[in-house]
Each structure stands twice: as structure tokens, then as C-alpha cells.
């Protein structure tokens, strides 16, 4: 564990210690204990949504990125349109999603999928296009082509860049979900955050914010972080 990581760990422990011992923070602890079941249900509902939406985005986003990289005409037409749509915040799709799907889970899922889908398409297409041409020529010289070329050469070569795209799309999906839940009356962390605001319950608002931050840190450092470090060592870039 590096010095920076040790300091980060000690700071986190110190923050928890202050949280539990400083009298002025007692309201937050009391709020957490009192509303523990509500927080647990909110975390469960939000995680179910993000896992479903992110999984759909992962499959179709990467597949479409490969298609855009493989067929230049599609990349320069539809691909450019997707790049343009990336500028539009995903929460702006919520009114349209409600008109299409009504006040339903599908409306939220649509916003989450859009939030994760667009950056993943762009990252996958860019990763494939940036592969050194020498790799492709060498593989074809050895008789590797078709699906085998993608599986044995292109996919491994793009993994570090695609992993960055996966991480970025997760961040966008998580933000999109929280924004949608804030505006949409449904179970979830965003709804708990909005409920705390409506009741002027500062301890609940801060607690939910910390839960959202905690989940983001766990996913970043517990899932994407180890995979990225492994890829960096494997590819000799660490």
C-alpha cells in the first residue's frame, strides 16, 4: 500500500471516529439508526436500477462501438451524431422518457442507459481506431482474420482504453440515476435525498449524500481500481 493510500485510509478512519464521537454530529448518527431500514431499501433499489441499466449499456454500447470502428461510413454518420448527443446532459432525456414510457421504471432506466451508453460507444470506437496498425498487419500476416482477429488481437489491445470507458460510463450512469430519482417519485437514494430536503431534515440529506459517495468509492476502488492496476501491470504501463 503506497504512502498516499495509507494517508487516505487513516483520514477515512479519522472521519468515522469524529462522526461517532463529536457531540454535534450525534444527530446524523441518530438519523442513520432511526432510518436504517429506509436507507437499506433505498440503496437496494438504486443498485438494482444501476446494475440493470449499466449491463444493457455495456452490451450494446461496446457492440455499437465495434461496428462504428469497423464500418467507416457508420462511424462518420451515426457515430458523429452520438458524439453530438454526448454533449446533452442525460437528465434532459427524462421528460421525453416520461412521455414515451409514462411514470414507470422504464423511464428511469432509459435515462440511466443513455447516460452510460453514449460514452461507452465513443470510448470503444476510439480504442479500436487507436490500435497501432502494425498489430493488425502482423496478425493478418500470421493468418488471423475475422472474429479471431477481434478476439485474439483487437480486444486485448483495447482493454486498457475500454476499461477507462467502462469506468467513465459507470460515473455517468450513477449521476444520471441520482438525478432521475431526485425528480421522479420512486424508491431510491435520490428519493430519500429529496424527501429529506422537503422535510428540512439536514441529517437525512447529509447521510444520503455520504451513502451515494460511499457506493461510488466502493465501485471505483473495489472493482475498477484493481482491474485497471492489473491491466497496467499486464501491459507494462504501471
Image: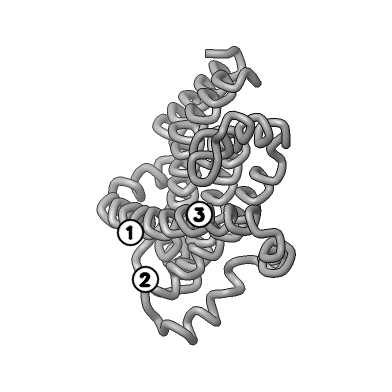
Q: Earlier in the sequence, mark 1 or mark 2?
A: 1
Residue 131, label in figure: none
Residue behind mark 1:
45
Residue behind mark 2:
186
Separation (CA) of disc 1 from disc 2: 9 Å
Separation (CA) of disc 2 from disc 3: 16 Å
Q: Are marks 3 and 1 in contact (CB under 8 Å)?
A: no
Quadrant holding the C terminus: top right
User: Is residue 139 depicted above or below 7 in this figure?
Assistant: below
**In what element is the residue under mark 1?**
helix
Instruction: Looking at the picture, tell me which residue is in the foreground, 104 or 203.
Output: 104
Q: Residue at x 29, y 46 (%)?
A: 33
Q: Earlier in the sequence, mark 3 or mark 1?
A: 1
> Across the whole image, how many numbered discs are drawn on residues?
3
**In what element is the residue under mark 2?**
loop
Q: Earlier in the sequence, mark 2 or mark 3?
A: 3
Residue 108 pos. (x, y %): 44, 70
User: Is residue 8 depicted above or below 52 in this figure?
Assistant: above
Residue lying furthest left in this view?
37
Residue 174, label in figure: 3
Amino acid at each position: 500500500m503506497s504512502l498516499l493510500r495509507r494517508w487516505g485510509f487513516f483520514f477515512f478512519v479519522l472521519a468515522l471516529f469524529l462522526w461517532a464521537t463529536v457531540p454535534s454530529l450525534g444527530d446524523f448518527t441518530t438519523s442513520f439508526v432511526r432510518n436504517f431500514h429506509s436507507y437499506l431499501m433505498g440503496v437496494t433499489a438504486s443498485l438494482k436500477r444501476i446494475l440493470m441499466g449499466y449491463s444493457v449499456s455495456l452490451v450494446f454500447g461496446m457492440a455499437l462501438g465495434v461496428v462504428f470502428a469497423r464500418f467507416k461510413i457508420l462511424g462518420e454518420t451515426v457515430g458523429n451524431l452520438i458524439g453530438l448527443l454526448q454533449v446533452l446532459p442525460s437528465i434532459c432525456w427524462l421528460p421525453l422518457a416520461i412521455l414515451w414510457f409514462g411514470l414507470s421504471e422504464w423511464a428511469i432506466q432509459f435515462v440511466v442507459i443513455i447516460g452510460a451508453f453514449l460514452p461507452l460507444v465513443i470510448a470503444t470506437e476510439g480504442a479500436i481506431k487507436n490500435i497501432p496498425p502494425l498489430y493488425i498487419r502482423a496478425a493478418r500476416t500470421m493468418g488471423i482474420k475475422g472474429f479471431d482477429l477481434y478476439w485474439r488481437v483487437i480486444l486485448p489491445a483495447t482493454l486498457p482504453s475500454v476499461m477507462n470507458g467502462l469506468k467513465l460510463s459507470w460515473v455517468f450512469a450513477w449521476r444520471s440515476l441520482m438525478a432521475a430519482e431526485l425528480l421522479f417519485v420512486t424508491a431510491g437514494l435520490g428519493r430519500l435525498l429529496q424527501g429529506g430536503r422537503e422535510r428540512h431534515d439536514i441529517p437525512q440529506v447529509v447521510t444520503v449524500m455520504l451513502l451515494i459517495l460511499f457506493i461510488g468509492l466502493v465501485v471505483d476502488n473495489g472493482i475498477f481500481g484493481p482491474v485497471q492496476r492489473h491491466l497496467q501491470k499486464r501491459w507494462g504501463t504501471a
